[in-house]
Image: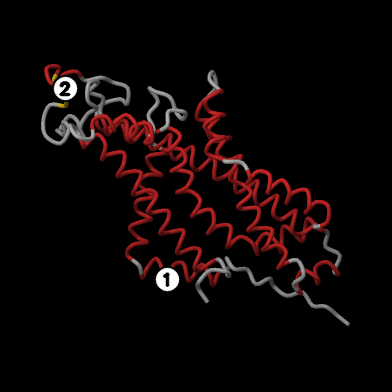
Amino acid sequence: MTLTTTSPPVSGGSGAWRSVRAELRRRASLKASLAVIALFALMTVAAPLIGALGGWGPEEFDKSAVDPYLGGQPIGPLGGVSARHWLGVEPITGRDLFARVVHGAQVSLLIAFSATAIVVLAGVAAGVAAGYFGGRTDTVLSRLMDLTMSFPSLIFMIAMMSVARDVNRTFLMILVIGLFGWPGVARVVRGQTLSLKHREYVDAARVGGSGPWRILARDILPGVSGPVIAYTTLMIPGMIATEAALSYLGVGVRPPTPSWGQMIAESVAYYDTDPMYFLVPSVCLFLTVLAFTLIGDALRDILDPRGGRS
């Protein structure tokens, strides 16, 4: 009996990506989402250049933009919006909101993207190893997944961020958030790997003399790429929200480094007297999370064979 090698039916193959492009052309919401993501990604990469367009640095005070006789309230309508300050200023300090939002995007999205990268790499490695090799490897990794997921992650994050003081807060947040996120990806990848490792093309590669690492690289990883891409896109909004929540609770990025969560936390005291100060970072956070969620839903429907799309 002769086994013939056939190409693996990869969910993220050219046919699926043609479907993605067709969806992008058909749905205006996805085009708008991509535009929002591209804008904030540009802010992340070129924050110093973009922030300098307004003429102010994120830590530069402008006392002439606030009224000392009104408790430091911004002078002018909409929280001090003017040709000098495009999105207004912070109460009391007079720091430019445009510059702080742009630099806050760099911090918030850098943490979210970096933590997501750690989660995906660790989750894919653990999931593929557990699903393909099975046996003791599967048992150890599965128990490690269960152990990690059993922790109350938010409480543990708050505790870890509170006790660590003289460290790089951004780097620590990336590690802490990434520490608790990988088991979800690993479970998805493990299940997909279990369904792929007994397919005919994998058996044919094994009989043909291919080693396990060659099979993993050429047959298994392409087969799990679709669900992983969809899962990753849906994970990024959660990472952004986690960073914002930790900063809002006072255990995230420390002043004067701006982040959206920190700005929202500071603006709560002024929401009734200067709503613009609260709205600017909140709208940026909302638009980013919404854009990634819409893109993630569309990719999941197209690329994940277990999604709701036939």
Label disc, if present, on residue 22 of the rendered structure: 1
Indicate which label's residue lies in the foreground, 1 or 2: 2
Q: Is residue 203 above or below residue 121?
A: below
Disc 1 vs disc 2: Cβ atoms closer than 8 Å?
Answer: no
Amino acid on which disc 1 is placed: Ala
The quadrant where residue 96 appears: top left
Q: Earlier in the sequence, mark 1 or mark 2?
A: 1
- Looking at the image, residue 162 sits to the left or right of residue 96; the answer is right
- Looking at the image, residue 255 sits to the left or right of residue 128; the answer is left
Q: Secondary structure at mark 2?
A: strand
Which residue is under mark 2? 66
Label disc, if present, on residue 187 of the rendered structure: none
Q: Nearer the viewer, residue 156 or 205?
A: 156
The residue sitting at 58% across, 69% down in the picture is 306
Q: Nearer the viewer, residue 228 or 26?
A: 228
The residue sitting at 68% across, 71% down in the picture is 8
Q: Position of residue 132 (x, y in %)?
A: 77, 59
Q: Secondary structure at mark 1?
A: helix
Q: Position of residue 108 (x, y in %)?
A: 43, 37
Q: Residues within 10 Å of mark 1 (few under 14, many from 20)?
A: few
Amino acid on which disc 2 is placed: Val
Q: Position of residue 57 (x, y in %)?
A: 30, 25
Q: CA distance from mark 1 to mark 2?
A: 50 Å
The residue sitting at 54% across, 66% down in the picture is 303
The residue sitting at 73% across, 51% down in the picture is 142
